Amino acid sequence: MQVYLLDENMPSTVPLWLSKNFIHVLDISNRFSDGDIWEYAVTNSLIIVTKDVDFYNRYLSSSDYPKII
């Protein structure tokens, strides 16, 4: 089962995202940096859902990365 980690810039109230397959980063911590989100996703095999281009840029220069949408 795929589990998605929603970045803080994504709304948490979309009906589709109100299931156990979606975790909003603010439900974990309101102090997570982009690096913290990245490491959490890698460690827990989560797919990051974001509008933040920084994650894509980091993906291009990393050998250990989560999936990103």
Image: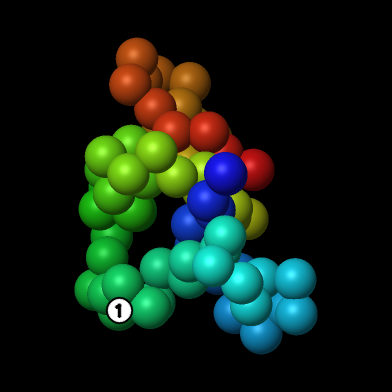
Q: Is residue 27 placed above or below 20 in the rendered structure? A: below
Residue type (three-letter) at the residue carrying disc 1:
Asn
With 45 as the anchor, is 31 left or right in this view?
left
Q: Is residue 3 placed above or below 8 in the rendered structure? A: above
Give the labeled residue for mark 1: 30
Going by the picture, which residue comes out furthest to the top? 63
With 31 as the anchor, is 12 left or right in this view?
right
**x, y percentage for residue 33?**
28, 60
- Give the structural element (helix, strand or loop) at label 1: loop
Quadrant housing residue 63: top left
Q: Residue at x 39, y 38 (%)?
A: 45
With 14 as the anchor, is 65 left or right in this view?
left
Q: Residue at x 64, y 77 (%)?
A: 18
Q: Residue at x 73, y 78 (%)?
A: 14
Q: Is residue 27 placed above or below 42 in the rendered structure? A: below
**x, y percentage for residue 60?**
48, 21
Q: Quadrant of the N terminus?
A: top right
With 60 as the anchor, is 39 left or right in this view?
left
Q: Is residue 32 placed above or below 34 in the rendered structure? A: below
Mark 1, other Cα within 10 Å: few <14 / some 14–19 / many ≥20: few
Q: Along the line of sight, which residue is nearer the eye, 17 or 50?
A: 17
Quadrant housing residue 61: top left
Q: Along the line of sight, which residue is nearer the eye, 50 or 13?
A: 13
